[in-house]
Image (cartoon, grey):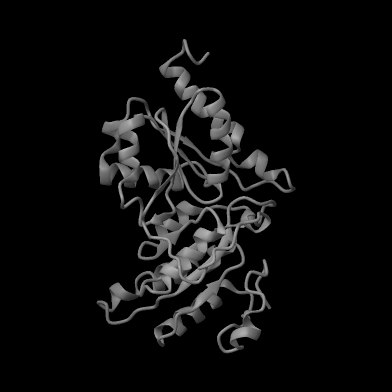
Amino acid sequence: IGGVNQSLEGLQSQFGEHRVFDTGIREATIVGQAIGLAMRGLRPIAEIQYLDYLLYALQLMSDDLATLSWRTMGRQKAPVIISTRGHRLEGVWHSGSPMGMIINACRGIYICVPRNMQKAAGFYNTLLKSDEPALVIEPLNGYRLKEQRPSNAGQFTTALGESEILHSGTDITLITYGSSVRIAQEAIQLLDQSGIQVELIDLQTLIPLDLNGCVPQSLKKTSRLCILDEDVPGGASAYIFQQLQTQYNIYSLLDAAPVFISAKAHRPAYGSDGDYFSKPNADDVYEVLYAIMQESNPQRFQ
């Protein structure tokens, strides 16, 4: 026991089989069991192997979990935390990022999209103190990267709805989340060499979204916007822009049309190079952002 990526290895022997146990590999059953446990007063963390497989449980999440408090006028609650991992890795079945579909179906559930495992741990600590259901989507390729383990891993928290500026700049605001943050950081290193200063913002959560107003404050400096994600065109990036426009009227802060970088309009191809051809990479981000600056100053950026 320990989960598909062994992130829970050793927990059953440490805490006992009544607190840590296997289920059948049927996503609807896993979420249904978690809802039942939560309604009886427990705080279950239900693991779904990969984000692609969350779709098999989407009806329960949308119809039952997300609506429980509303349907009962707050008399019942189910603080379920659904833990999964997704975005880029390799293969058609393990690299999906159907965020637009999930967002639209799961209003009423927090959706957390940490860029690394430290941020994910902070979300779990935050959500275990909450009475609301939540979905945490860990970056799948993070299991192949080393991170420093915090000394207070069981105590520190990551705030919901607070975007974070990871790189300051004055030319373009680049918004993203999850595994795409690392891609954006790689592109920014290249853009720095070309004299383009990018302000990188990690949204961290999609529901709620940028409650601290990080994006409009950035756009007041840059007046240019690019949204990067791994969903198909018209997916999560469209939701992000709509939310920001509704909350902050960001279009009035722009001197150029907003630009969107997404995955291709198909599932990731088979093989280790499938993500390279299906998902945005650092070169894609560089070319798009360079073109934005070239349009505004063609003499400087030829």
| Residue nearest the observer in this picture, 208 or 154 | 154
Question: Can residue 242 be seen in the rendering of this structure?
Answer: yes
Tell me, yes or no, if residue 135 can be seen here.
Answer: no
* Residue under the point 62% across and 50% down: 88
**x, y percentage for residue 143?**
65, 59
Q: Which quarter of the picture shows residue 293?
A: top left
* Residue 285 picture location, percent across and down: 54, 33
Q: Is 74 situated left or right of 192 in this image?
A: left
The quadrant holding residue 238 is: top left
Residue 67's place in the image compared with 237, above or below, is below
Picture coordinates of residue 59, whole percent (x, y): 46, 68
Q: Is residue 169 left or right of residue 302?
A: left
Identity of the residue drawn at 50% across and 71% down: 154
Pick the residue in front: 250 or 12.
Answer: 12
Which residue is at the far right? Answer: 271
Q: Residue reaching furthest top?
A: 299
